[in-house]
Image (spheres, rainbow, N blue to C red):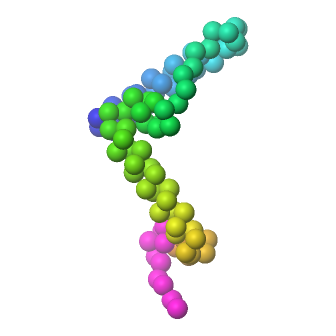
Amino acid sequence: MDDMDNTDLIKQRYAEAMELEKMSDTDPTKIEFEESSGNVFADLVFEDSDELFTRAQLGFHVIRILKDLFSVSALKSLTLGNFTYRR
């Protein structure tokens, strides 16, 4: 699934959410929902949902480790690409 397909899918899901919100204003008993699988990408029916979820988890853990290792200012420099390590 390429980026354009993903964008279209997100727009479709947003439109569906807006319709549900309109329904909730008139009759709260008509709201349909389903429990999350724990993978937001699978819930949004992305074809490569497992890969996307794994990449998101990896990114989350990398940032957490970097925050533990570096100060906030050093992390900003690293993110901006002008980080030089000094002892």
Question: 32 or 26: which is nearer to us?
Answer: 32
The answer to which image quadrant residue 48 occupies is top left
Question: 77 or 60: which is nearer to us?
Answer: 60
- Identify the magenta region: 78-87
The residue under the point 63% across, 9% down is 30
Does residue 73 appear in this view? no
Total numbered labels placed on residues in the image: 0
Residue 87 appears at what percent x and percent y?
A: 52, 91
Q: Is residue 5 left or right of residue 60?
A: left
Question: 36 or 47: which is nearer to us?
Answer: 36
Residue 32 appears at what percent x and percent y?
A: 58, 15
Quadrant for the N terminus in the image = top left
The residue under the point 62% across, 14% down is 31
- Based on the picture, tell me whether residue 79 belongs to the magenta stretch: yes
- Based on the picture, tell me whether residue 17 belongs to the magenta stretch: no
The answer to which image quadrant residue 23 occupies is top right
Does residue 12 appear in this view? yes
